[in-house]
Image: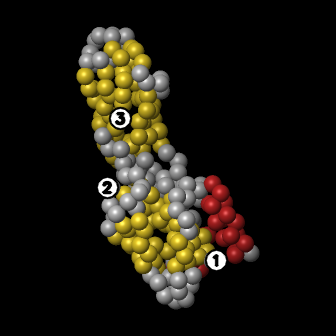
Amino acid sequence: MKSTCLLIAFALFAITGSTLFAQDTCKVYSLKNPHGAEMDITKIWVVDSVNFRVRTIKALPFHIGATESFDIEVCILARDGKPHTSQVRYQNTHGTSSYNVTMTGPAVASVSDGMMGEGASQGVSAIAPNPATDYAHIQILRPAGQKLSVRLYNILGDDITATTSIEAGESDVKIDVKSLANGRYFVAVVTGNSPVTTQSLMVSH
């Protein structure tokens, strides 16, 4: 019965990614026109693009009056349960303006202890370097002779790499991250009879 529950839990993760990955936390901010004169908003970006993303509610470019405000949506991408602060910048008729935001990233949900079963002693034990620029070495904690596979997921839970099988006796896997965009990813280890365990990996070129 336990094995059946574990297989179902992993199947749900493989389909939706919801077992391990929290959804983005987003908030809408209303920014007042700081210049007291009509202006066009032509571009918006966030300085810390690793931990945040931003967009305007209206499609760019758009015009606002001297006393009008406009709405932006800021999403925090960090998944460490910690507060992060960044500056949102937007290009307008009068130059570049900025707005500071502070948001707390949700902690990544993981498989509960009650579902870990015998696989609790298996998984990722270390990632180095982290952040990684070109390659990341994944140290695997494993029982002797146990076959494992390694997968890499983005923050939305999408599988972005083919499964990498680990032969018996191996405990180190090298992952090429040169083609990945800067940001946070998750390294997942899967065994034949246990659910997924993960650690986060930062990519910064």
Disc 1, SS: loop
Residue occupied by mark 2: 205
102 above or below 90?
below
User: What is the distance, in whole Å, between disc 3 and disc 2 at their CAs?
Assistant: 19 Å
Chain-order first, disc 3 or disc 1: 3
Disc 2, SS: loop
Which quadrant would the C terminus be assigned to in this image?
bottom left
Depth-wise, is mark 3 or mark 2 nearer the camera?
Answer: 2
Q: How many marks?
A: 3
Crowding around mark 2 (Cα neighbors within 10 Å: few <14, some 14 to 19, many 20+) is some
Chain-order first, disc 3 or disc 2: 3
Disc 3, SS: strand
Give me the residue at 42% from left, 44% from top: 76
Image coords of residue 81 (percent x, y): 41, 53
Give me the residue at 26% from left, 26% from top: 96
User: What is the distance, in whole Å, between disc 3 and disc 1 at their CAs?
Assistant: 44 Å
Give me the residue at 72% from left, 72% from top: 4
Looking at the picture, which amino acid does disc 3 mark?
Trp
- What number is the disc on residue 193? 1
Depth-wise, is mark 1 or mark 2 nearer the camera?
Answer: 2
- What number is the disc on residue 45? 3
Looking at the picture, which amino acid does disc 2 mark?
His
